[in-house]
Image (tube, grey):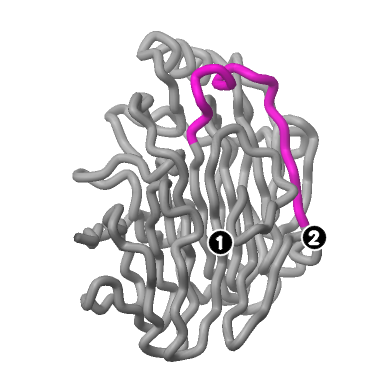
Amino acid sequence: MAQLLNSTTHDIGGLTVNRLLPHMTKRMVGPFIFFDHMGPTSFPVGEGIEVQPHPHIGLSTLTYLIEGQILHRDSLGNCIEITPGDVNWMTAGKGIVHSERESFETRSKQHNLNGLQSWIALPELYSNIEPSFEHISRHDLPQVTHKGVMKRVIAGEAYGLQSPITTYSPMFYVDIIASAQNQLEVPNPKQETAIYIIYGEVEVAAQKYNSGEFVLLAPSDKTISVSKNSRLILLGGDKWESVPYIHWNFVSFSKERIEQAKRDWQQGNFPSIEHDNLEHVPLPTKHTL
């Protein structure tokens, strides 16, 4: 039967997030090793998100906003503001540094932030590739509308649609808005699948789930019934038989590689971000996510 995975609450750069993955009973869903819902939060004038420069290895990060703006900077020289519906896809590979802040225009007024951030683990074959960054406009993401259901494929492949984002393992990440009384088919039945309900109510195998709940479907679950007007994320991919280690912002199949990354960050061996190199997130003294 489907499994409800409860979230934990964390503070990141002045922003409260609900963390769904990794979970104590389920570390990964397909290649997804981390899943946060950021906000929803309302900031007064002069305040906002302040995620200082920090490093990553061995993963891709996916940022997708429902409301608000975030200014992304990284050690490759990218500086771009993401807005709702767009995708920031950053592949760390052997190592990258980035920050997540706000523009002058955003910080100078009252503003809201509500969004999703995921980490997608890189297969061992690709874990040490050169870092890269892709910003995809919402207008370039494939989507379809039919009988009260809107589907937008953010990453991977689902429902016969393919996102332009460069992925490194079979996966899907789909944003769906559906009116009540619709039925949704699981996009790739042979792959692991989870649902995150942004708002509304859905039913799986006679069990109802509501806003803010993250549900891991059973292999026998093929359909999702929409009880109320809903917006939900469907995500998943091929099940990983070998799960990489995760420590802070580092993902690797090698403990030694993680220890090296920790030393490199402490010793200043990661590349820096142009125009954002005056402060950074220190390596935590204990294991944390």
The answer to whether residue 27 is above or below residue 18 is: above
Name the residue located 31 percent from the left edge and 69 percent from the top edge: 213
Q: Amino acid at mark 1?
A: Val
* Other-residue count near label 2 (Cα within 10 Å), few / some / many at <14 / 14–19 / ≥20: few
User: Which numbered tag is attached to residue 140?
Assistant: 2
In this picture, which residue range is highlighted in magenta? 121-136
- Asked if residue 128 is among those painted magenta in the image, a careful observer would answer yes
- Residue 72 lies, in percent from the top left, at 69, 49
The answer to whether residue 94 is above or below residue 143 is: above
Please state, as top left, top right, bottom left or bottom right, where the C terminus lies in the image. top left
Residue 53 placement, left or right of 40: right
Name the residue located 64 percent from the left edge and 66 percent from the top edge: 152
The answer to whether residue 42 is above or below residue 122 is: below
Contact, mark 2 vs mark 1 (Cβ under 8 Å): no
Q: Earlier in the sequence, mark 2 or mark 1?
A: 2
- Asked if residue 190 is among those painted magenta in the image, a careful observer would answer no
Q: Amino acid at mark 2?
A: Asp
The total number of labels drawn is: 2
- Residue 254 lies, in percent from the top left, at 40, 13
Residue 274 placement, left or right of 158: right
The residue labelled by disc 1 is 174
